[in-house]
Amino acid sequence: MRVAVLAGATLTMPALADTLEASAARRTLTGKPVFLTADQDATVAELAETILPATKTPGAKAAKVNEIIDVILKDCYVPADQQRFIEGLAQTNKLSQDAYGKAFVQLDPEQRIEIVKKLEADAKRQLEEMKAGRTATTAGAQADAQAPKAATKRYSPFFTILKDLTLTGYFTSEIGATQALEYVAVPGRYDGCVPLKPGQKAWAI
Amino acid sequence: MNLNIDAQKDMTYDAIVVGSGISGGWAAKELTQKGLRVLMLERGRDVKHIEGYPTATNNPWDFPHRGRITTQAAEEYWANMRTGYTANEEWRHFFENDSQNPYIEKRKVDWIRGYHVGGRSLMWGRQSYRWNPEDFMANAKEGIAVDWPIRYETLAPWYNYVEGFAGISGAKDGLDVLPDGNYLPPMQMNCVEKEVKARIEKKFGKRHVIMGRTAHLTAPKQQHYDLGRAACQFRNQCMRGCPYGAYFSTQSATLPAAMKTGKLTLRPDSIVSEVIYDEKKGKATGVRVVDQNTKQVREYFARIIFLNASAFPSTSILMNSKSSRFPNGMGNDSDQLGRNIMDHHLAVGASGSWEGMEDQYYYGRRANGIYIPRYRNWAGDKRDYVRGFGYQGGAGREGWNRGNGMEGFGAAFKDSLSQPGSWGISIGGFGEMLPDPNNRMTLSPDQKDKWGLPLIVFDAAYGENEKKMRKDMMNDAVEMLEAAGAKNVHGYNDESKNPGIGIHEMGTARMGKDPKTSVLNANNQLHAVKNVFNTDGACMTSASCVNPSLTYMALTARAADFAVKEMKKGNL
């Protein structure tokens, strides 16, 4: 029977369109970033590891999260967001230089945490300003007319993009899905009510 | 075209089926099993069962962008971007590149297409509900549009027949509003859903929370195994194509059944431009086809023609089939062809969090949810709008992506995301849309696609009845979730969506009793051309609020049975 044959077999995988896989393939083939510079790529790798460090389970660096961030940034983000991300990396190193006289990648883990706290606070402030800007516009036509345009424009701050891509990159990686989470490719059945075992991990998908 | 007699013979069949999706697959299966030699034409590429599903067994990390949409795809798939999910990397290859297949919008319609063998049967939502007797009578009782020429009782045995073959999982809930069918065992609710069901039913009495009824084999029968189908594996990756054939699709079910007869010829890459009409015979004699790759034009001939290209393309083909008898499109004496566009309006409902039950989880990924059948304007309830809505929804525990909404990072943050999050529940409405003759499609007089066929022009919008209904759809959702004990309940009513967003487009060649006011008769024949049938969404006279595909299946099986009987009687 068709299905029995399938069980142990690898499906034939016709190549997807070049445009879909080109960046990821190029990154794997050359080992070089496709969007970031080598320095920026190294900074992203350490930032991601600071957000999701190795604990009982491997961290973001082991899962090569910087590589998928590089590819997704290139293919899935519009230029304005790409630009904000690059500026955010520069800002990270500026904060690092100002506080410790070193680039972010040269800091020790505790120092990195302090810098990332600043990035997080900065993103929080930007989001609150955007929210306040919107509140002002709804307060009345006059306030709207007087409000500077930039204050009402919505965008994702650098740290928001970085954290989103780090979480996505890690928890959808093989390491993240199978070690930090529990991945069952073919569950085979559905049980609606199952007592949670102590320490049981969340399903990966 | 200059054809010799032998060539014409090669191009002649007993029946031609245009389209290979849910209804086309059924037409091909029924007609071949009744002994007819059938040609099934599909405008798009071939998709073979299993080997044609390139991402079906991918792990999350196998996707180059982990499922995300590239900026290039976002531009090219501009209509698909309105759904928020159809352009996803996991299954984008089954949806149409809108830039390659443009359409024109006077008023917007979200048109989501699947041009390939199997059509949208590969990506459909699989929810399968019978209409109730009132659904077929509401137009007549309320004086809206025209009456259906058939009743529930006409279709009931056909529902029974198609449910058995397709394999529909569901419980017999004994509700008038949602007649029970011929079901495989239902899937299970999880702990929170069970609790929500108990509390809502206790508080509201006439409102019910049931397990969704879906076209999945929960316990296959011999007839399903015989086609190479197997039980649902609860992977919830259905839209990538199912390598187990566990949900109903053309590839898993109707196509292998039709192929077994040895009487089906399937021809992909064949865009039907028009139905050929013989003025002397007063009948259609065949169809004209443009090869999507070579642009070569061919003609195929048959005694009967089933148009199952999905609502808008079937309508477009009829509109493009002009003759001196039908200057405004074949079968369009009523001027109803292309009018009365309907869909189900959605993007309205509520969600909330759930405190407690933290010691409970679930195993497996259930591609199904709970369903709350219509209760408005039902059993004595009376609102300031007509018809009603149902809800689809479900409860689950938050996953890792809750981390984006949380402050913090680092070791403790990471390890907390390895644990299941708190429970949440959401329900989203599916509302009935009324037929309105001003919601219509026409063909552009001057703009053509790359095959030289006129572009479709849409001009449609939701009406006042839908807008009033949506207030209830949001408020009732909030009220029920709060009554069920959910916390932080948030209602939403996104009015930025357009007809078509439900991907349940219907109504543009409606059935009716009177040729002056409808396009099709009670047997899905064109009133004016009896050997042309339509049994896809175009034939629908009203929309109900339940998902339509099961009804297309039943109508198709019934029309095919009628057609073959008529042929045997010499009437066609």
Image (tube, rainbow, N blue to C red):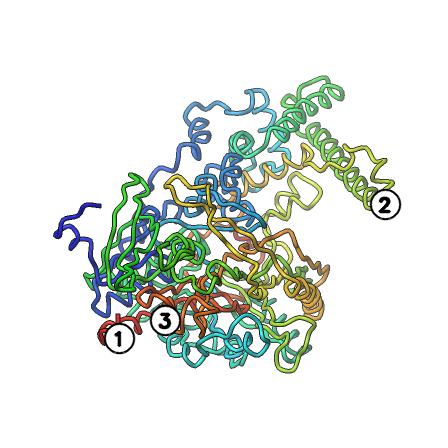
Location of residue A159 with respect to B361 vertically, above or below: above
Judge by depth and name the residue closer to the eye, B18 or B276: B276
Provide the residue designation for mark 3.
B162
Residue B173 visible? The answer is yes
**Left or right: B388 as drawn, with respect to B61:** right
Query: In which image quadrant can residue B149 be found?
Result: bottom left
Location of residue B183 with respect to B307 vertically, above or below: below
- Which chain is disc 2 placed on? A
Q: Which mark is residue A140?
A: 2
Instruction: Please state which of the two labelled residues, at mark 2 or mark 3, is closer to the viewer.
Output: 2
Question: Residue A111 placed where, x, y %?
Answer: 71, 27
Instruction: Please state which of the two labelled residues, at mark 1 or mark 2, is closer to the viewer.
Output: 1
Helix, strand or loop under label 2: loop
**Which residue is located at x 45 percent, y 73 percent?**
B514
For badge 2, the amino acid type reads Gly
Quick one: label 2, few (<14), some, or many (20+) residues within 10 Å? few
| Figure label count | 3
- Which chain is disc 1 placed on? B
**Left or right: B303 as drawn, with respect to A144:** left
Helix, strand or loop under label 3: helix
Location of residue B394 with respect to B46 vertically, above or below: below
- Which chain is disc 3 placed on? B
Question: Residue B179 placed where, x, y %?
Answer: 49, 78
Judge by depth and name the residue closer to the eye, B229 or B120: B120
Question: Residue B486 placed where, x, y %?
Answer: 69, 64
Quick one: label 3, few (<14), some, or many (20+) residues within 10 Å? many
Helix, strand or loop under label 1: helix
Q: Are marks 1 and 3 on the same chain?
A: yes
**Which residue is located at x 73 percent, y 59 percent?**
B488
Which residue is situated farthest in the left direction here?
B6
